[in-house]
Image (tube, grey):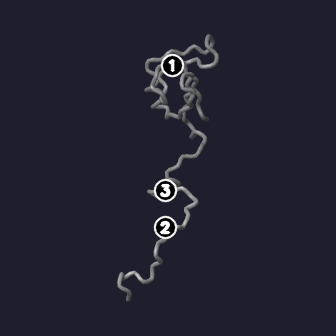
Amino acid sequence: MSEDGFDRLRRRSADVPVDRPRDPQGRRSLFSVSEQPAAVGAVTVSCSSCGLTSVATPRQALRLAVPSLHLPLVKRGHPSWMRCPACGARTWVRLGLRL
């Protein structure tokens, strides 16, 4: 056995280039979110202020919609005035239901 006790391990050299970015926790691929369609029964909320589209459960959408105003015949693009789940502001949004 050698003096340092780790005779089977190769010594690290400082001149070995690393050509990929380091992931210190090694979990980036496990917790990455890919673009997936909304689940059946989900409500999509498209905000006119921040431009983001959020997915909410029907219960969350009902909580966001109280109080709200819906003018589908008057205002075509974003007919509902309610709280946006992405930015938290009360603004004009477009609601969609995934069937």
Nearest-to-viewer mark from 2 and 3? 2
Nearest-to-viewer mark from 3 and 1? 3
The Cα–Cα distance between marks 2 and 3, rounded to whole angstroms, is 19 Å
The residue at 54%/26% (across/down) is 50
Amino acid on which the number 2 mark rests in the picture = Ala
The residue at 61%/41% (across/down) is 37
Amino acid on which the number 3 mark rests in the picture = Asp
The Cα–Cα distance between marks 1 and 2, rounded to whole angstroms, is 55 Å
Question: Relative to residue 3, is residue 87 depicted above or below?
Answer: above
Q: Residues within 10 Å of mark 1 (few under 14, many from 20)?
A: some
The residue at 47%/77% (across/down) is 10
Earlier in the chain: of badge 2 and badge 3, it is 2
In the rendering, at what x and y percent does residue 95 appear?
Answer: 57, 25
**Residue topped by disc 3:** 23
Earlier in the chain: of badge 1 and badge 2, it is 2
**Residue topped by disc 1:** 91
Q: Residue furthest top?
A: 74
Q: Residues within 10 Å of mark 3 (few under 14, many from 20)?
A: few
**Residue topped by disc 2:** 14
* Front one among 85 and 71: 85
In the rendering, at what x and y percent does residue 77 appear?
Answer: 63, 19
* Front one among 22 and 53: 22
Earlier in the chain: of badge 3 and badge 1, it is 3
